[in-house]
Amino acid sequence: MKRKTGQDRSITRNWRPATRAVRGGTARSEWGETSEAMFLTSGYSYDCAADAAARFAGEQVGMTYSRLQNPTVEMLEQRIALIEGAEAARCMASGMAAMTAALMCQLAAGDHVVAARTMFGSCRWLTDTLLPRFGVATTIVDGPDSQAWADAIRPETKLFFFETPANPTLDVVDLAAVCGIARKAGITTVVDNAFATAALQRPMEFGADVVAYSATKLMDGQGRVLAGAVCGTEDFINNTLLPFTRNTGPTLSPFNAWVVLKGLETLDLRVQRQSENALKVATFLEKRVPRVLYPALASHPQHMLAMRQMDAGGTIMALHLDGGRASAHGLLDGLSLVDISNNIGDSRSLMTHPSSTTHAGLSAETRTAMGIDEGMLRLNVGLEDPEDVIADLDAALTGIGL
């Protein structure tokens, strides 16, 4: 009996998010496997020379080379597009490969980019260092200030780039307002949604054009592999992004794609539970440290906006200690359960000191402007019992006199 090898979009588009995350994109071979197959191959063979020529000419459907297509990677791309509500997606070797490609594929010398001040350190390196090398000017604005985006527009402005919630300050950008400003001016918006994922926030529902991910984070969720993804319209993915990636080669391995496929099956469950845990931890920390930034706390400067855009507060928060780096490192060194690690989105609780790790490559002046001081710590709350995480933080805080 011949097995069905693909999915009917008229059916999958009616699935609810949890179903899409488990079954979206699944293509079965003639063996009828229930778990997605892992196709560890670099190339593909053809029945005849004419078939090879037709595939390379785009006249015949089929795979040609795993730098361009791979069945396992394609399943992941379709699943991510489904859960994001995008027409298409393209997966890449890492989150930064995705961010770089999402920008570089549509920019040229003479273009202008407006970017949020607070982002992951490597994303600021792209805007501050890489793009200017190729003649692309960048204006940095305060992300939460919607008027600042409008004021920064020039005739040559091509793209808005921001992350919300932002790494590591948890700044929240008004998606509807900023995307609306961009669309009215004919500007493309690229949103880094790694802190929330589609399980909590879907920027395209607010008008975003392109959504980029480090799938290394919550999508995998267990700290196993590197992966990235870019979502957009079929036209953007196939005619703007694909020519860039097929020739520059930021290819995702089939093994990593398979691991992320497995991670997506539990994404909703993990994110919801971790968000519940994070709120409990943040509520405790708010009573013990000078300042906590977590979107679901009423004390967050953009709490109401965050809760309009997000289904929950997410897994990540920032806390500020008096005493600078000495206090921050002292707290880290006093932990016994929570790991010192610069990763996020893991099922294990992780904490890092951004000033000396994730954002260490930026100047002290830039970090200060971003709101990253030497007393800041970023905490990813995992799936452990939150009371155990609280007990560990309590003991570490007591150890440094708090």
Image (spheres, grey):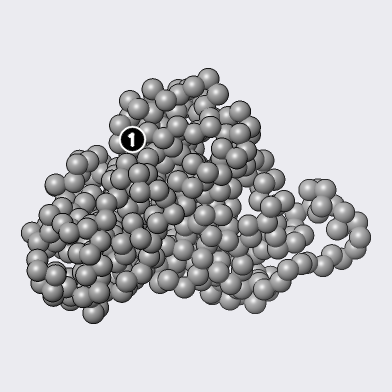
Please tell me which residue is depicted at 68% across the width and 56% down the height of the picture.
249
- Residue identifier under label 1: 142
Q: Is residue 105 visible?
A: yes
Residue at screen point 30% across, 31% down: 145
Residue 390 lies left or right of residue 119; in this view the side is left
- In the picture shown, does residue 395 fall above or below 117? below
The location of residue 291, given as percent across then percent down, is 15, 53
Total numbered labels:
1
Q: Is residue 315 above or below residue 222?
A: above
Whether residue 310 is visible to the viewer of this picture, yes or no, is: no
Percent across and percent down for residue 245 are: 66, 51
- Give above or below for 143 relative to 350: above
From the viewer's perspective, is 351 left or right of 283? right
Position in image of residue 314 (x %, y %) = 28, 56
Q: Residue at x 44, y 43 (%)?
A: 191
Farthest right residue?
49
Question: Against 39, is 158 above or below?
Answer: above
On screen, residue 200 versus residue 14, left or right, reads left
Name the spot of residue 265 as percent of width and height, x first.
Answer: 43, 67
Classify residue 347 as left or right of residue 246: left
Residue most toward the bottom? 336
- Quadrant of the image containing the C terminus: bottom left
Image quarter (top left, top right, bottom left or bottom right) of the N terminus: bottom right
Looking at the rendered structure, the kind of residue marked 1 is Asp
Foreground residue, 196 or 400?
A: 400
Label 1: state its secondary structure. Answer: loop
